Structures are given as C-alpha cells and as structure tokens.
Amino acid sequence: MATAKDVLAIAQKYVGVVEKPNNNVIFNTIYYGREVSGAQYAWCCAFIWCLYKEAKASDLFCGGQKTALCQFALDYYRKNNQFFLTDPKPGDLVFFRFGQSSRETNHIGFVESVNANGSVNTIEGNTSDASANNGGMVMRRVRSAGIVGYARPNYDPEIIELPAIFQNVYPQKGIDISKYQQGVNYRALRTEGVKFVVLKIIRKDLNPDEMFEKHYQGCQEAGIPVRAVYNYSYATTVEKAKIDAHRVITILNGRNIPVALDVEAEVQKNLGERLIQIINAYHSVIQEAGLKFCVYTGLSFYKTYIKPYINKLNCTQFWIARYPSTLEMHVKDVPPPDKKPDVPGLIAWQYSSKGRIPSAYSGNIDFNILYAPIVEQTRKTGTVTANSLRVRTTPDTKDLSNVVGYVKKGEVVVIYATDVKTGWYQIDLEGKQWVSNKYIQIN
C-alpha cells in the first residue's frame, strides 16, 4: 500500500500540468487507455485514480474499482464508513458541489494541509482560477466553500518510532474496546492520535471476548500499545474471583499485559467488606503471575462501595469512569479538568462513552486518559501525626509557592515512593504531591 505522504508527493509533482483543448490530458489517456477529448471527459476524478495507480496503491481508491465519477467515489466511502464532515487531514479526499449540479458532488481533490481558520489547501485536477470545478489544470487551491465532506482511505501509517510517541510520555489518550466494536480500522486509530488501547479479555462465561484476539493483533500491526486488559467481574465470592483471575492469565498466554478488574455489577453492590476481599484475592493471583493490576469502576460505585473500606484494599491504582458530558467527543477534545475524579491513586480517567473517530469506527467508543504507567504494587500506608500537614508539589520546604493542599491528623495516605535525598513521601501516582516523612507514622 502507501502512506498519505506517498500519494501527496505524487500529486505535488503534477501541479502545473495543463490539458490540451477539451479535456485532452495525460490522466484521461492513462485512465481510458487512449487519447480522448470532449465535454464528457471531465478528469478531476480520473486524476485521483491515476495517482493511486502510480503509487501502486489502487485498492486505496474505491477499493480498487475504476471510476471517473465523483459521486461513485463519495458513495463508496460513505458505505464503508470512511466519509465524514469535519476534521480533515492531509491525504484526505475532499468532495465539492459547485453550480446547479443534480448530484451531491461534482468535483474532487486532495487535502494537502489544513489552515487554522478551517479552510483547506488542496491539490485538484481539472480546475482553474476562472472555474471552481472545470478549468483544465492541476492546481493548488484554498477551499472553504462548496465542500460536501471528506474521505480517508486506509493508508499505511507513517513510520514513527514508538519511543518518541508512546513510551513514558504521559498523560496519554486512548480507548477501550470489546466485541461490541467490530470493523475497527486500527491504523486510522493511530493516525487520529490514539496512543493506547485497553481490551476486554473475558466474557461472563469465562470464554475469551469474541474480539480480543482480533483487536490485539490489529493493535500490534498498527503499532498501538495495549496498556491493559479488563475483566468485567460478576464475582461475589473470593473463590470465584480466584477462578476468574486464573482464567484471564490462561487467555493472556504469556503476554505481559496489566490486568484491570472491572467492579461495578449490580450483584457486587452491598457486599460490604467482602467486595474488598474479592478484589484483594483477584489482585493476589494476578500479581503472583508477575502481572500488574488496577481496579476499574465508576466514581459513584467507588465512593459508595470501595472508599469506606479503602484502608483494607491492597490495590492503590484506580481507573475511574466519570462522564462530564453526554455530547459526542473527538480525540482532540479536552474534558473539563475540574471534572477529573478526585480519587487517590487515579491511574486513568474514562471521561466519555460517546467518543467518535469516524475514520476508524462508525459507532461510539469509550475515551480514556492514562496519567501514569500501571506499576507493581506493594501497599504501604501511613497515618498523619501533625494537626495539619502541608502537601507540596516538590519534596522541600524552600519554595513557599509549592503548597497545593493539606492532610489532617489521623488521615491515612498511600505512599508510592520515597525521595532519596529528603526522605519525603510521594502520595500520588503522578509525583505531584509530597509530604514530610517526619509527620507520617508508617502503618
């Protein structure tokens, strides 16, 4: 196949080509296999077809079908969920409708770049300064009017070294998917800025999720890290939790991927301290297998059924769902910071169940922010002994502006790290909250 840059590079070298009179142009000659002329041989779409042919990537244009009709191309991409109205990117096809055409579209071009004001810079065949959609040249244009929509062919991803994008760069935006998301274009996910994926691994009957292996393979081929797998739990006993955990390990089959236990089922409400025992038992099995672990749940469930027993829970990392909006969101959208769940040990925030990535999937996808890598956990807690202990962004008292809050006497904090130089304790996962070790009694 080819990348968007590959095809654009070919388009760019033809800028300035002019037809002979009446649509007699090299692109029509290649398309029809002979020289043609006449009003019936408009060639904006034939130009596009020729570019993909030259790139040896004909399958990217209408699935390899041969067409010089703009409407046929638009219909194809719409049918295959690759047509959308907003957020164009370089390499997209752009469809126009000019004049009194009876069709939805009567002109096509390439998006070369996107401007801050929303207009697009294009490369188009059969255009001119005098005519929007029929002019006899390959030209660069700046377009905002007449645009019907965009299509994104399934280009190969640009080769970017993973360490530059994915490793140890936080926070990261990602998605979680399961059997309910089929027909995913994994390469498009990466192109759109998805930095990680979380996969559902197991069903209620303990068989693998129907799409787990397909999703996993697709992410591997597209170069998207699978940061975790999750198990929606129905366990109401410690014994059932252990069985579930062992089954997840079996399905992973040696893959070193962190495991998230999803606790939110109706049957797990009102279990009291037994829910904590269930989580601890599951956690123990996962950790003994050498895998990292976190808990996924909704903010309300956490506050009602987990927080009252938090001091007895071995897990110190939480992936919390809280949706500040019921509106559709795109990857570039930023959730309101003041709606971020206020949960100690927040490792990730699922902030939307109505994420939209039209070029990769036609339906809704859960959007998440990962704030730090999931780490191996050895729970260590301490009790505050001072009446009011300052929480600072750095482990020192010299900077008077680094105070971000207070913890009160008797409050229990989770200790994630110790500063070698000062001995201070880090009490959050992101390294932004520190307290003096002089006023913490280790439990």
Image (cartoon, rainbow, N blue to C red):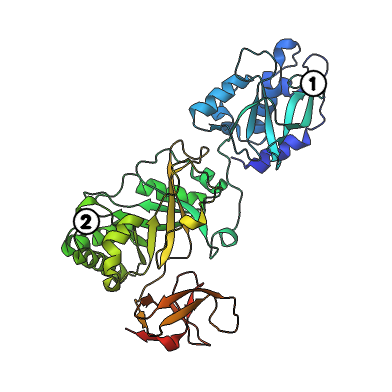
Residue 429 occupies quadrant: bottom left
| Residue type at the position of mark 2 | Gln
Give the x, y percent position of residue 186: 49, 45
Q: Residues within 10 Å of mark 1 (few under 14, many from 20)?
A: many
Label 2: which residue?
Answer: 268
Instruction: Looking at the image, tell me whether mark 1 or mark 2 is earlier in sequence order.
Output: 1
The numbered mark at residue 311 is none
| Nearer the observer, 382 or 155 | 382
| Nearer the observer, 419 or 64 | 419
- In this rendering, is residue 188 above or below 145? below
Label 1: which residue?
Answer: 136
Mark nearer the viewer, 1 or 2: 2
Q: Residues within 10 Å of mark 2 (few under 14, many from 20)?
A: some
Label 2 SS: helix
Between the C-alphas of marks 1 and 2, the distance is 69 Å
Give the x, y percent position of residue 428: 45, 71
Give the x, y percent position of residue 442: 35, 85
| Residue type at the position of mark 1 | Gly
- In this rendering, is residue 407 above or below 48? below
Count of residue discs: 2
Image quarter hosting the C terminus: bottom left
Residue 271 occupies quadrant: bottom left
Residue 246 occupies quadrant: bottom left
Image quarter hosting the N terminus: top right
Give the x, y percent position of residue 308: 27, 67
- In this rendering, is residue 47 above or below 258? above
Q: Residue at x 37, y 81 (%)?
A: 409
- Specify whether residue 424 is in view: yes
- Specify whether residue 256 is in view: no
